[in-house]
Image: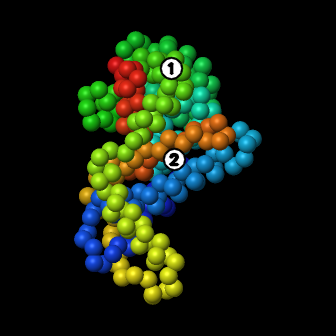
Amino acid sequence: MCEKRDFFPFEIAVGSYSPRFVEAEAAVACHLVQGDIEDLLLRLCAPDTSGRVLTGACTDKEDWLAPIEMCATYNADAAEIARDLALTWLSLHDKESVSRIAGTSLDALHARIDAAPRGARVPMKGTSELTRSLSRETVLKAIATPPAALLDALEAAAVPDDTWRAAEPEAHEIMALLRQLGEAPAGQGPPAFSARVTSASHVRFLEEHAPFHVRRLPSGGVMLATHPYRTLWPLWADALFVLGLMS
């Protein structure tokens, strides 16, 4: 786990002669923090090929939350990507500590969920009636789905939305400015001023539009990640809906 204040920049440099564009500034802040978080999680979970760490996650909270309520997860075996859903459901339904059950085999997690009452659901933070809860049946069907199909659906759901894509051109301009400032001798870079990127508007943009990354790792593992202000649930909800598993 890590805390977002250790990564998230409070200010970034922007061109002094360009108009303020909150969305672009937020997108730059996202680029700066998300790469660091993914790098940190990968270094902690897979420092070598020993396979000692099977699963891990990143959050801005003090406790290890349900995986799809976090901003990043790691699974050493991509074939067990449904573990994120299973751990989430058991954590919320049985009030289990994720840190205590994280190493449980997927078969054992399946058995526990299967033993729960039919129709049982756990609450989720969603924007529609369909995404405000996760059912036992959805999780069981996801576990039974070929992992390759789950990963394909997650990758398809990770495509940035139109609002994010609209902000990218200006964000790239700011990133270019940051590179120029970083390469120039002190006091000799292009004109710029500091813009705070922690306003309510910046935070709201990231909560609603920060992109998702699905990284299939050379080791055979997989990492799912987004900005700390967002959770992985929207990614999973879209993927499960496309597969026809939401109920």
Image-based side of 127 in relation to 158, left or right? left
Q: Above or below — where is 156 with respect to 143?
A: below
Q: Amino acid at mark 1?
A: Thr
Residue linked to disc 1: 145
Q: Secondary structure at mark 2?
A: strand
Residue closer to the observer: 220 or 66: 220
Q: Secondary structure at mark 1?
A: loop
Q: Above or below — where is 183 with respect to 65?
A: below
C-alpha gap between disc 1 and disc 2: 26 Å
**Which color scheme did the rendering employ for the protein?**
rainbow
Image-based side of 211 in relation to 37, left or right? left
- Mark 1–mark 2 CB contact (< 8 Å): no
Image coords of residue 66 (percent x, y): 47, 36
Q: Quadrant of the C terminus?
A: top left
Decide if residue 121 is in sight here. Answer: no
Decide if residue 221 is in sight here. Answer: yes
Image coords of residue 196 (percent x, y): 33, 69
Q: Amino acid at mark 2?
A: Cys
Image-based side of 234 in relation to 4, left or right? left
Residue linked to disc 2: 58
Quick one: label 1 or label 2, which is nearer the N terminus? 2
Q: Above or below — where is 198 with respect to 190?
A: above
Residue closer to the observer: 75 or 187: 187
Residue at 64% from the left image edge and 51% from the top image edge: 43
The crowding category of the residue bearing disc 1, from other C-alpha atoms within 10 Å (few below 14, some 14 to 19, many at least 20), is some
